[in-house]
Image (cartoon, rainbow, N blue to C red):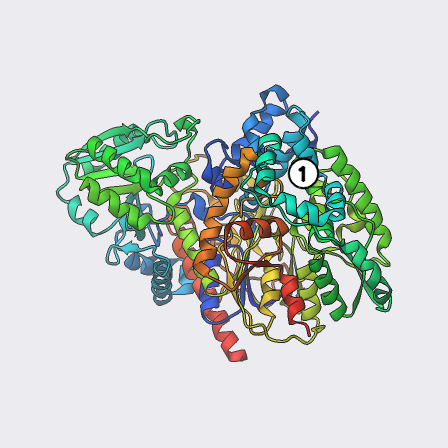
Amino acid sequence: MKFDCIIIGGGISGLTAGIRCAKEGLHTAIISSGMSALHFSSGSIDVLGYLDNTVVYKPFEALDTLTGTIAQHPYTKCGKPLIIEALQFFKQECETQNVYLFDNENLNHFHVTALGTLKPTYFSQRSVFNEDVYNRFKRMKKIVIINFEGYRDFHPQLAAAQLSKHALFANCEIVAKSIEMPQIQNLSRHPHEFRSIDIARIFEDEEYVYKIADAIRLAADGADFVVIPAFMGIHNFNQIHNIIQSRTRLLVYEVPTLPPSILGLRIDNALKSRFAQLGGVFVAGDKVVRAEIKDDVVQAVYTANHPENPLEAKFYILSTGSFFSGGMVSEFDNMYEPVFKLKLHFEPQRNKWYSPQFFYSHSHPFLEYGVVTDENLRPYDSKNNIIQNLYCSGAILAHYNPIREGCGSGVAISTAYKAANQIVSLYKLMR
Amino acid sequence: MIKLENISFDHCIKCTVCTIYCPVARVTHLYPGPKQSGPDTERLRIKNPELLDISLKYCSNCKRCEIACPSDVKIADIIQTAKWRYSKKEFRIRDFLLSRTDLMGTFGTLFAPVVNFFTHLGIVKYFLDLVFKIPKGRTFPNYASMTFKKWFKETRKYQNKYLEKVVYFHGCYVNYNYPQLGKDVVKVLNALGKGVIITKEKCCGVPLIANGYIKKAQEHGRHNIKVLSKALPDEKTKIVSASSSCSLALKHEYANLLELDNSPIAHNIAYITQYVLEEFENGNIPKLKPLTYTVAYHSPCHLERMGNVAFTIELLRKIPGLTVKILHSECCGISGTYGFKNEYYAISQAVGNELFKIIEEANPDFVVTDCETCKWQIEMNTKYRVVHPISLLAEAIE
């Protein structure tokens, strides 16, 4: 098959690049092997959460410091104006699919995790952060954290205990409650077998959503905030959030759960349907296994299901993610990028890959390993030659630490946007 | 002993992503989902078959879990294998008949007008429901009065005139129920300058696997590998099929599930739209007249699993004048013989509802899909006619 642009990897980065290319009229395909890390994500978009181990409140000011000090950082290669443009693009594209992202007027805000810790982030879905949450925060007295009886993947007592340790909540009463699942027809399973996805589907059912709202109102009487695990619908989340808030007359707030993350799933659905709407071809469940390169130009890629049928394009983007997603492979004393055998940045000695402590504040060095690129995000092959029509974006890139800097999704979006921008302008020149 | 190559369940990280995309788990709590029925309980079953949780029977083998899995676990294969390896065998005349497509087809075509008349009678359906536990709401596909094989005898001498050849695995549905699709395939391949070879094939084995007749499926598999590889005039000749499930069986199920050596044919098998699209892209394009329809394209689960959906979509886009609306990928619910059984009928219909809704919303002239059982399910549940992409292409060829 022949395309203008083939994107390898269907996560947040690949989809963002795909939408940008397809929107500009390029015939674009995304090859994706298995569902992406969005299914394990908070569903909030971090731009820059930490710098020098302190929490960042003004991400765009901190960005200047970061790009001024780390020359090879993907953000430095993107530059601030492009990062701002990319984030706005991402927000608008999500809005076309009714996912509304709230930014706290260019400031970071906190979202609460399932363990009751606070994480700085830039965009959140409106059920996680909005103007009302911001305004109520200053005069709150009581927070009620609610779980559904039997649901194993969220522990409100643990979240309450952790949250009340935080200075921001010093004068606030935090209570953990649980409510019963509504009686469901033919329910032969115990509620502890339910995962987030099962409960989110119950919320989607009009028959039950009002009963759930009534149970929440009873449990959370007098609360300024009600915190529930992110169950408020997979498709009709805006409507369900409205129903629950207006029926309880309470401010109901979602926290991301353990996988599968409903908040992440909403973003994944939105990006995929937007890409399809723009005429993009999404190949799910197939894996690019090798490439044909001639004179530093990628000629074709081949997949596991079709090892003999070339997929050809003028341009390629590699957004296969880090080790977990298979973008890079680590062996006992070696690391490599499996598709193009690109030049990687990593320490050869295995004992330098990780920190001795799992939760070390400086995080693990291996998170900074990845593909080395020029300032246009084009990678080098093993002989140190730049591959002319290949760009890299997202977690496969080297020289940044998504955990320590709190910047994973921001880098994924910005670098995807930059890669796609260059392809779009070259494509227009060629025509 | 655990075979080392069959420990893909150990790669499961318990992320539950497969359960999100399982159409059966979406509609019923009777099925705990692919993660629990597959990799979770496999480790118990290999220790002691008594620990089999019978709820895995609700798996319809759509394989959407395998497409979703980020860790490359062969979830559906694990469940299918466990079904026949550990569950108690009981003979059911219904399952026997549903899985013997060759037998039923031979009988059905022989007495086609009578059989078709009776299978649509309310009283007969009531009887089938009562005695055989085949849901009375289900409509049966009609049998043709002349098989595709018989028709092909007439055209065989013309096929020999073509220098280049393609082996065509037509499958039971084309042979006994809908020879027109086979005729369309021959027309398209001839228009590309290729002669068609057919073999003495047997049913690919998909309904046998689904009903637990693994030995019989292996027997069919061995036979098909033999006759197909024998029919290949050279290594480069392709074996095409216009049924997504037959293709999946020949290419993947034979090796992965039935543990047969399909290497003599594996590299030659191509689903038809992939083969035709590649000919088009190499410049071998017959003259096409514009078709001014608006169609909705539904991608069958097994075509998704093969990674072949893009080929069909790209081929449809090559037909001038055609407006193609790509439907959001959903399972239609029938899953072969699954939707023909009383105990799964309600689940099958509930799974399909999502798809029927989006078809109604798309409001096309008709629906296009690659799979015969998807066709039955959609035609039974919506007002739309369903056409195979190759039949549409055949219509465009002058």
* Kind of residue at badge 1: Leu
Number of residue marks: 1
Residue A246 drawn at (x, y percent) = 20, 45
* Neighbours of disc 1 within 10 Å: few (<14), some (14-19), many (20+): many
Residue B223 drawn at (x, y percent) = 82, 43
Question: What is the chain identity of the residue bearing mark 1?
Answer: B
**Most foreground residue, A416 or A81:** A416
**Most foreground residue, A232 or A319:** A232
Residue A285 visible to an observer of this rendering: yes
Q: In which quadrant is the N terminus of chain A drawn?
A: bottom right
Q: Residue at x 80, y 48 (%)?
A: B201
- Left or right, residue B367 beside residue B154: left
Q: Secondary structure at mark 1?
A: helix
Residue A165 visible to an observer of this rendering: no
- Left or right, residue B234 beside residue A262: right
Above or below B317: residue A252: above
- Left or right, residue B128 beside residue A391: right
Residue A305 drawn at (x, y percent) = 66, 52
Above or below A117: residue A310: below
Residue B274 drawn at (x, y percent) = 67, 61
Q: Quadrant of residue A300?
A: bottom right
Say which residue label 1 marks.
B98
**Most foreground residue, B170 or A316:** B170
